[in-house]
Image: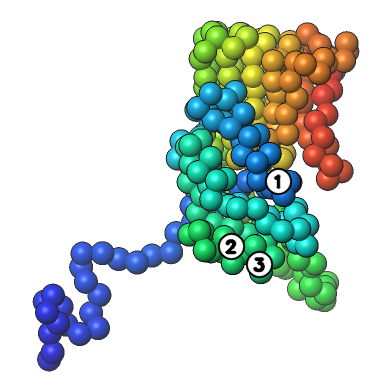
Amino acid sequence: MSVSSAGHSAGQVPASFEIKSAQLPLVALLLKSNDGDVLAADVLRQFGPDGESPDFFDHDALVIDFSQLDPQEPIFDLVPLLKVLRSCSLVPVAARGASPEVMAAALAVGLVEAPPDVHRNRPAPAAAEPVANVVETVREVVHEVVREMPAPPTMVVDKPLRSGQKVYARGCDLVVLAMVNQGAEVVADGNIHVYAPLRGKAMAGARGDTNARIFSLCLEPELISIAGVYRTSENPLAPNVQGKAAQVRLSNDGQEKLIIEALNS
């Protein structure tokens, strides 16, 4: 029997480590401009050290999504944008949705190629099988989902939030039972419920959940955002929702517009 110099049999896996597949959460930066200077300035204005939300990210892994850009347009230098993203506590690791030329440029600066977003590029369903088989398949899937899916967690805050305070409900919904004052921030990967006046900033769906919503019994925000689509107090709310019980959601027509609706009593 032959033994390697490290003391392991030839072909034997070392006991000091083990390789396994892993699925990790990634933040996606969906580019909508080919102007690198504009992109860098906008990211810094929102998430930079002196921006509106300087502590929004905590060294989160990031994939840069080029799928919305015109593949015929020349790509800007990626290095300055990567530096800006790192200054915002983001760690760019991958690129997706890029033309071959852009992907080559991304690989050259150390990014890896990620698969396309399955939600934005969902394949067409396959041809239907006989009715009996389809019914049986659906029954099995529903059974597994009901049995295995846990209830989503929720963070509850029962004290008023003062100016300068920030609460981030990572991976869950956020329920606030007291006032969110001007200058305070509430952020959640899921929904945000404020059972009191909301006068600060509220950002739901922080990691891209376009189904997230914001609810408040008294909507008077400085800023509201769903999955990165935001509106500030510079654009006043309509009288039927300003200071009233209301909800904020994204339109379901693919236009990514904020819809602000009064809640019926």
Residue indicated by mark 1: 35
Q: CA distance from mark 2 to mark 1?
A: 16 Å
* Mark 1 Cα-neighbour bin, 10 Å: few <14, some 14–19, many ≥20: few
Which residue, as the protein is rendered here, is positioned at the far bottom? 1
Position in image of residue 156 (x %, y %): 53, 21
Q: Nearer the viewer, residue 45 or 247?
A: 45
Residue located 74% across and 20% down the image: 232
Which of the 4 image quadrants contains residue 179? top right
Q: Amino acid at mark 1?
A: Asp
Residue indicated by mark 2: 105
Pointer 2 with pointer 3, Cβ within 8 A:
yes
Horizontal relation, residue 5 to residue 167: left or right: left
Residue indicated by mark 3: 101
Against 220, residue 148 (above or below) is below
Horizontal relation, residue 80 to residue 76: left or right: left
Position in image of residue 234 (x %, y %): 77, 16
